[in-house]
Amino acid sequence: MHVEQTTLDYLDRAEALYEDVVGVVADDGTEYTYGEFADRVHRLSNALLDLGVEPGDRVAVLSPNTHYFLETVYATNQLGVTNVPMNYRLTSEDYEYILTDSDADVVIADYDFADRVEAVRDDVPADRFVGYEADAIDGDWLDYESLLADASSEPPERPDIAEDDDATVNYTSGTTGDPKGVVRTHRTEHWHALVLSHHMEIAEDDTYLWTLPMFHCNGWGHVYAITGAGGTHVCQRTFDAAGTLERIREHDVSYMCGAPTVLNRLIDYEENNDVAATTGDRDLRITTAGSAPPKATIRTIEEEFGWRLIQLYGLTETSPLITTSNSPRRLAAGDDAVVKTKQGHAALNTEIRVVDEDGEDVPRDNETIGEVVVRGNQVMDRYLNKPEATEAAFNDRVEGYFHTGDLATMDGNGMISIQDRKKDIIISGGENISSIEVEDTLYDHPGISKAAVVPAPSDEWGETPRAVVVPKPDADLTEAEVVEYARENMASYKAPTGVDFVDSLPETATGKVQKYELREQYWEDEDRMVGEG
């Protein structure tokens, strides 16, 4: 029997089985059972229909981690409407680009961020604008709660929705240039949520804390997975360490996600404040992704915080999960903290290869570097309006595989270790140097809070590693000390030849360091970079 796999299955299941269970806790503490949450979703769907929204339209949402972000995802999906979640840390010009590129028909925005859309509303295709707490927004915005109050709570009549229909368009974070619209279908999201649920051990008694931005890869799939399992979403508008630790204790959180920078901020806060406890009554596990956390960070999280850390690797284009460290075989590799700096094994029904320039698999020696290519049902359908980029992404080195642009090694157990983005490999005197490896070494220094390593011009070597370091508050670091520390703890040719101290690093909303901004500072007077980064 063939049954269409759509995102609608997840809320339908929660509404049918967990109607009286608290499904969503809003940022202000308001609780909604899954029955009440579904009622609000249906009201929003009917309100959108009253505004003239039709199947195939696109509704953009600009919101932090809120109950109404979750409502908008499900309300649009059940109407056959494509959801376009937007990064709330962008500029008006960025929103003009995204709204135009996606040809959005409606914008739903939070009161804290709507002004940036208001500034360009005359220059974008959208002609209907809905604001959460519209009274706090300058301009002509329809009020979200008023629309829901006036709309029917009856489930709307659903159009025929096929699994290959577009469900969402997620824009890449832009760490290597302009964002691209990643088109994800109902099948892509449905399949990914199932795989995620297995590898992240999601269960109906889970209480999930939203520190990870919901807009990013649809919250790494947890928008769907937590709902389908009947778990509880606890919303935190935007991340702050004090609020996160308070919610963990108050709601007895069992599961959460965060990039390595989130882990570091939690560690810094705990070290400098009187924290009552880092868990509630239950054990807590945390999934991290992006660049691998340093070993020192992993040990602190697991040994001092008492949390279990799971590494996830993926991209916006892959939903994101394609590999995870959460596998029994990882334990055979020795030091658990070392293993968890690896991105792990391929997820269920996912094929991962690491290939050389000719598309041939590299040796599984944990040393030979190649590009990660992937094939699986969770991989995107296409880049919106970019057929040439889509063609290249699926056929550059190996036909029919998505090319991640990430460089990695693979060991004998099939575990991959990301070494760098293509653009972040430093080619110094003909030697390839992984900036991640250098950063991992620097993070072990007791006086370093954050570090990023990028290529800088060198008359002798073409380019050379340069470290950009955020010292810990009481640290009295010198350039010579940091360079010498690196030389003592890794091959000398890999050590940075210079260090700049800064108060902060440029980051995306999900905590990824925007290295291209750092690179540009060093290469703005040069014709080209050796590694073309």
Image (cartoon, grey):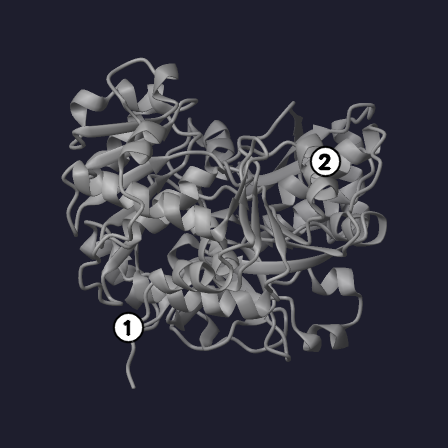
Q: Is residue 123 left or right of 32 when viewed as pictured?
A: left
Disc 1 secondary structure class = loop
Residue 251 is labelled as none
Task: Say whether residue 354 is visible.
Answer: yes
Which residue in the structure is indicated by mark 2? 246
Q: Quadrant of the N terminus?
A: bottom left
Identified at 58% across, 41% down, the residue is: 211
Q: CA distance from mark 1 to mark 2?
A: 41 Å
> Given the image, on which type of amino acid does mark 1 rest?
Glu
Residue at the farthest bottom position: 1
Q: Quadrant of the C terminus?
A: top left
Q: Is residue 224 left or right of 3 when viewed as pictured?
A: right
Dot 1 or dot 2, earlier in sequence: 1
Counting other residues with Cα less than 10 Å from the Cα at mark 1, is it few (<14), some (14-19), or many (20 or more)?
Answer: some
| Camera-side residue of 55 and 438 | 55
| Camera-side residue of 474 and 13 | 13
Which residue in the structure is indicated by mark 1? 4
Answer above or below: position of 152 versus 398. above
Task: Say whether residue 369 is visible.
Answer: no
Identified at 76% across, 39% down, the residue is: 267
Identified at 27% across, 22% down, the residue is: 141
Where residue 7 appears, as percent x and y from the top left, is 35, 61
Q: Is residue 398 left or right of 125 when viewed as pictured?
A: right
